[in-house]
Image: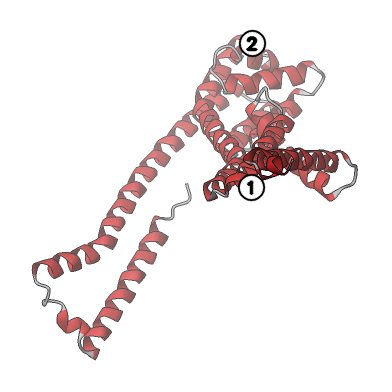
Amino acid sequence: MNDFFASPIAGWVAIALMAVGGALTVFLAISLPNSPFKEKWDAYVAYLNQYVRFLLLKESAQSIAQKQAVVIAILLVILAATGNVLTLALMVLVAAGPPVVLGRRKTERIEKLEEQLDGWLLMLANSLKATPAIGEAIKSTVNLVQPPMSEELDLLVKENQLGTPLDQAILNMSERIGSPVISGALATLVIARQTGGDLPTILETSAASLREMARLEGVVRTKTAEGKGQSLVLGVMPFAMTLLLSWIDPNWLTPLTTNFVGYIIITIAMVLWLGAILWARKILAVDI
């Protein structure tokens, strides 16, 4: 018996029992109503659910959170058994990974929707010329566009078919996506529908405006990227020149580091360099 407790197997059995006990403790803490841990868990699941619903994922937020908890529990056991610090880094990665990945996918989806917006407005304008009813026109464009726009339009059509007024369904789509560009275009659609007028022409004008905005944003991004590259080169150049001169002639910069005047010159140069970097960053910080 004493030999068993002294063997490595006993250590692994103890670690396994600790893992099972920890899992049961967490399960009970989640199951108990009004417990602080359950409140935090529900808040985290609700946070993930925002991304899951927007991305139309088949896997639930609860399932993602549970898988995270299981993996973290396994890593805790490994950490207790081995003491490897890398395991701690993996735990942080597992804890922060899903929100970061889902957030990135949400951003990419919104950008893709904004790219598809002007094309969809033109399709809708052409559909309205053949079908005066805007609900039928929107329905006819669902199969003409690629995801993710087709998915959002399909949700809009289904909401309308289930009894939601068309204007409200359009506003729900705007709120669901959360893009200022798409919100502005859909608001224009709702207002034009309510006030009357030549809706196809309004949509064509909106599509043309969006294309021009996209072109100008591309120009601004290109010029800003060029400016950032130039500022990076100019920021590194003084240090590169200093290293080069020191390599060519180690005594060339000695006067700057052997007397008070040299230190003053270095201080002034560093202040001017820092001011130039901050000024360049402020100029290039363009909000597109």
Q: Nearer the viewer, residue 206 or 180?
A: 180
Which-is-in-front pick, marks 2 and 1?
A: 1
**Label 1 amino acid?**
Ala
At x 79%, y 24%, the residue is 165
Q: Farthest residue toward the right?
A: 33
The correct choice, above or below, for 206 with respect to 100 in the image is above
Q: Nearer the viewer, residue 184 or 264?
A: 264
Q: Gap in Å between the C-alphas at discs 2 and 1? A: 68 Å
Q: x%, y% of residue 195? A: 70, 30
Which secondary structure lies at badge 2? Answer: loop
Residue position marked by numbered label 2 in the rendering = 131
Q: Farthest residue toward the left?
A: 249
- To which quarter of the image does residue 3 belong? top right
Q: Earlier in the sequence, mark 2 or mark 1?
A: 1
Q: Nearer the viewer, residue 147 or 35?
A: 35
**Quarter in which the N terminus is drawn:** top right
Which numbered disc covers residue 80? 1
Q: x%, y% of residue 135? A: 70, 16
Q: x%, y% of residue 50? A: 70, 36
At x 53%, y 30%, the residue is 206
Q: Nearer the viewer, residue 243 or 215?
A: 243
- To which quarter of the image does residue 163 belong? top right
Left or right: 234 in relation to 197: left
Examine the rendering and report whether any part of residue 47 can be seen: no
Q: Farthest residue toward the top?
A: 130
